[in-house]
Amino acid sequence: MKSIGFYCDASRIEQNALEQLQQYAGRPFIEHINAYPDIHYCQEKALPVGVAFVTKGWCYPLITGKDIGCGVMYLRIEKADWLKPFDKSKHYTALQFAQQQMTDEGLGGGNHFLSVEEDDSHVYIICHTGTRNRGIALYQECVSLTRNYEREAGTPSDCVPQEYLPEAFCNYYNAVLEYGYARRKTFCFKTLAFLQQAGYIRYRRQEMKEGYLKHNYLPLPEHGSLHGTEYQLEDSVHNHLRFNNGQVIHRKGSTEILPGKTVVIHKPGR
């Protein structure tokens, strides 16, 4: 069994989650495996949520489940641009109705959310969602690929050699991750436009076009201005595979942090 890196208080991990983690650390081809503060038992899978591990030459395509590409994005504005307290009686239902029109597939269930938060200097629009039906279709592709390998190898297996993954599959996988990014970006910008139009955020009214819920905001950069409101956008994924020079990084509910990026970290204890 490979040693486990605990980036959390190991004594506070649920016993059933710890047992899952220890059992998984004994799987073949796993080089490093780490546990993070949000680790908790997963009834549907053999691996707890809140774990990342690395393999070399092989991968475990099924560890993410169907919610492939799930992540959290935030759009940050200066608090000075926020004009008044949010009136839940007037706009909560309106925002809920608007978000249902922002994308074709909605936020999804479970712990997915769209939220407005604040600290001392900024206001944040935070979106937690994934790839919806495309993620489900990709997971089904992962199941088919794994079963095909099992038949060829003549033995049960939930891992496959990396060379068994066609280039087209890896490209498809990465495209689905990009789709998740695009969905979160759409939610954040359309929520910003909703709040501008509702009078909560300072903006240049003459720049706001009609039908903002139908507008394509994807070409906008991660740092810029929308209708005169300066913003900063950051995104992270926490449920996916990364194929990198013969290694595969597997993340099941563990936030990916890339150099130079700021991300939303899951709160321990959920």
Image (cartoon, rainbow, N blue to C red):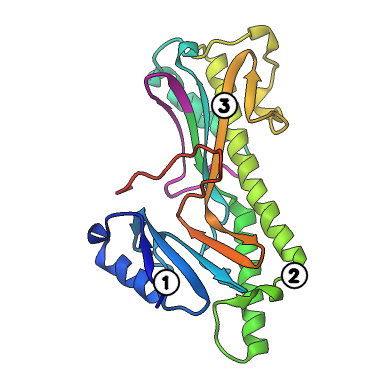
Query: Which residue position holds label 2?
Result: 166
Instruction: Say which element carries label 2.
Output: loop
Q: Which mark is residue 232?
A: 3
CB under 8 Å between discs 2 and 1: no
Mark 2–mark 3 Cα distance, whole angstroms, equals: 37 Å
Q: Where is residue 24 in the image (x, y as percent from the top left)?
A: 41, 73
Is 252 displayed left or right of 21 in the figure?
Answer: right
Image height check: is 168 above or below 228?
below
Image height check: is 133 above or below 60?
above
Q: What residue type is labelled 2?
A: Pro
Earlier sequence position, callout 2 versus callout 1 = 1
Q: Quadrant of residue 120?
A: top left
Tell me if I can see residue 212 in this picture.
Answer: yes
Earlier sequence position, callout 2 versus callout 3 = 2
Q: Where is residue 128 in the image (x, y as percent from the top left)?
A: 49, 42
Earlier sequence position, callout 1 versus callout 3 = 1
- Quadrant the N terminus occupies: bottom left
Residue occupying image coordinates x 58% and y 39%? 184
Q: What residue type is labelled 3?
A: Gln
Q: Quadrant of residue 147?
A: bottom right
Image height check: is 103 above or below 268?
above
Q: Residues within 10 Å of mark 3 (few under 14, many from 20)?
A: some
Q: Position of residue 200 (x, y in %)?
A: 49, 14
Q: Residues within 10 Å of mark 1 (few under 14, many from 20)?
A: some
Instruction: Say which element carries label 3.
Output: strand
Q: How crowded is mark 2: few (under 14 residues within 10 Å), some or many (20 or more)?
A: few
Residue in front for this viewpoint, 245 or 155: 245
**Of the two numbered discs 2 and 1 in the rendering, the one whose residue sits closer to the viewer:** 2
Query: Which residue position holds label 1?
Result: 46
Mark 2–mark 1 Cα distance, whole angstroms, equals: 26 Å
Q: In which quarter of the image is residue 223?
A: top right
